Image (spheres, rainbow, N blue to C red):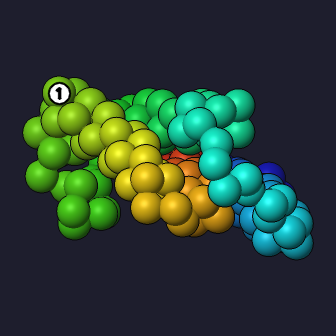
Amino acid sequence: MEPHGKERRGKERRGTFHLLLAVVLFVGSVAAAQAFPEVPTKHKFWDATNKALFASHAALEAVDFDITHRNLSDGGKELDPMARALCESGTAGQLVFFGGRMAGVVAITYLLHRTGHHKLERSFPIYASGDSAYGVAYSFAHR
């Protein structure tokens, strides 16, 4: 017998969640398996690597913003207690939250660069992108 209504949508959502989770875990395991390349002791902050890391993080933040905005517009709830006040206050609050996250990643990365922690400078945007990817996967699975 074919599943109907809510039961069918529940199975589709679980399938989507498991697919996204598998992709996130695969990408994370590949990234963890790779040794970080030696970072030159002197390099410009806005080099090609940092530009690519920031661009990929910005893209994930944009997707996270979009799916969170849609979920909240459809009556969903923000589960992150630190984001709740801004995200549930409307589009402007959501823009402030997600824009602030992006600005925070760039600022912390710059601080790490200026203090000579170049490996952490490279790894922090990767960690932040993983956090955003998790948010995207969770939001897609629970819409």
For this orientation, the residue located farthest to the top is 92
Q: Is residue 36 left or right of residue 108?
A: right
Residue projecting furthest to the front: 42
Q: Quadrant of residue 83?
A: bottom left
Task: Examine the image and state in which quarter residue 126 appears.
Answer: bottom right
Q: Quadrant of residue 75?
A: top left
31 up-or-down from 45: above or below: below
Secondary structure of the residue carrying tag 1 is helix
Up the image or down, 132 lies above or below 57; here it is below
Question: Which residue is depicted at the point 59% across and 36% down?
Answer: 44
Please say whether residue 49 is visible from this viewpoint: yes
- Front residue of this view, candidates 125 and 44: 44
Image quadrant where one finds the N terminus: bottom right
* Percent of width and height locating residue 47: 65, 33
Q: Which amino acid type is shown beneath numbered disc 1?
A: Ala
Q: Provide the residue designation for mark 1.
A: 92
Label 1: few (<14), some or many (≥20) within 10 Å?
A: few
The residue lying at 57 percent from left, 32 percent from top is: 46
Q: Is residue 84 left or right of residue 60?
A: left
User: In x, y percent, where is residue 14?
Assistant: 67, 61
**Residue plotted at (11% across, 39% down):** 89
Q: Measuring 32% from the left and 35% from the top, which residue is drawn there?
A: 99
Residue 14 visible somewhere in the drawing: no
Where residue 30 appears, as percent x and y from the top left, is 87, 64
Q: How many marks?
A: 1
Residue toward you, 43 or 57: 43
Q: Between residue 7 and residue 24, name the one nearer to us.
A: 24
Q: Position of residue 141 (x, y in %)?
A: 58, 54
